[in-house]
Amino acid sequence: MSQVLDQLVFKYPARALRHSRIILADCFEWLEQVPEDCLHAIVTDPPYGVKEYETDQLMKRESGRGGIWRIPPSFDGHTRSPLPRFTALTDRERKEVYVFFRAWALAVRRAMRPGGHVFIATNAIMAQLVYAALVQGGLEFRGQVIRLVRTLRGGDRPKNGEKDYPHVTSLPRGCYEPWGIFRKALPPKMTLKECLATYGTGGLRRTADGRPFEDVIASERTPQRERAIADHPSLKPQSFLRKLVYAALPLGQGIVADPFMGSGSTIAAAEALGLCAVGVERNPVYFELAAEAIGRLKQVQAPRVDALLGVEPDGMLF
């Protein structure tokens, strides 16, 4: 498998990990070069293709000036994290999101093996737009994973009308995060059994004790110990990502890709499980962050999750 991973680096700057490779590249350019029917699964948290992770917007976020990022006030002793202004997107920007994800789905469908699954993070505001674009791009919608977590999104009183309308909230307080589940279609007349035998894909992996993968997962906000390792605005907890990465490879073999790697948390989850992965990130700052953070993130202890998935202390599945 190492040889296959090395072939997926092409000529891009890259780092080799024990089971994985991380690559500094634009994911569209990279996906164009990936051989057809190559990747077994994708687990990713994309930037929605608008502008929240462009350099100028990240600089505004760091300086507290906002831009596309909403810098929430502190209250009740809690400081909320900056959030992209998805509710403020114009019709043009929404169309850009749709076009971006439709094109991305087309690229993914070519690179994925038949039956390969895609787990993609989104939110309640953007989900319907993103899902429609992915289906239009040729992927099958297979449901959602509902990550139960209090995100502190929503629940605000009307801006500049807090005193006039104290009993009104602009949006529901966010208590879940939806992850869309998609699949590249099986070849015509091919059964799931045949797809598993031919491509090693098509289904989702059961837990170590034989229970099926469930689409509601009680989660946690990303612990401070993980944020201290990887300072990324969309960092997801290892306790959650390990469940997705594990489920995405039904036979426990193959390549999981994260085309929007960010700080490398998905790759760290795969490394912790002893699974092969490839991460692609176009931002040099985040690429270097991932190169430093993955080794530490994979060492994060998640005893309940690891026991459920059958992970030994050295990070290998048994």
Image (tube, grey):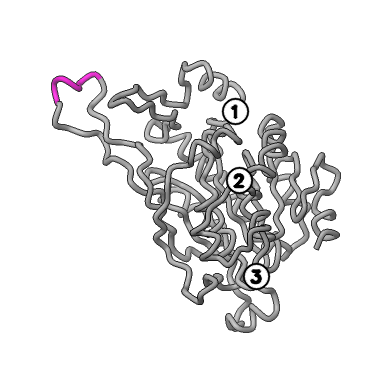
- Quadrant where the C terminus is found in the figure: bottom right
Q: What's the CA distance linking mark 1 and mark 3?
A: 42 Å
Q: Residue at x 42, y 47 (%)?
A: 220
Q: What's the CA distance linking mark 2 and mark 1?
A: 20 Å
Decide if residue 261 is on the left or right side of residue 5.
left
Residue mark closest to the camera, 2 vs 1: 2
Q: Residue at x 31, y 36 (%)?
A: 154
- Residue 91 x/y as whole percent: 42, 35
Q: Is residue 164 magenta?
A: yes
Q: Identify the element where label 3 is drawn.
A: loop
Q: Main secondary structure of the magenta part?
A: loop
- Residue 87 x/y as whole percent: 37, 34
Q: Is residue 186 above or below residue 105?
A: below
**Range of magenta residues:** 160-165
The residue wearing badge 3 is 318
The type of residue carrying mark 2 is: Ser
Q: Residue 54, which numbered label?
A: 1
- Residue 301 x/y as whole percent: 56, 50
In front: 144, or 102?
A: 144
The residue wearing badge 2 is 265
Q: Residues within 10 Å of mark 3 (few under 14, many from 20)?
A: few
Q: Residue 100, which numbered label?
A: none
The type of residue carrying mark 3 is: Phe
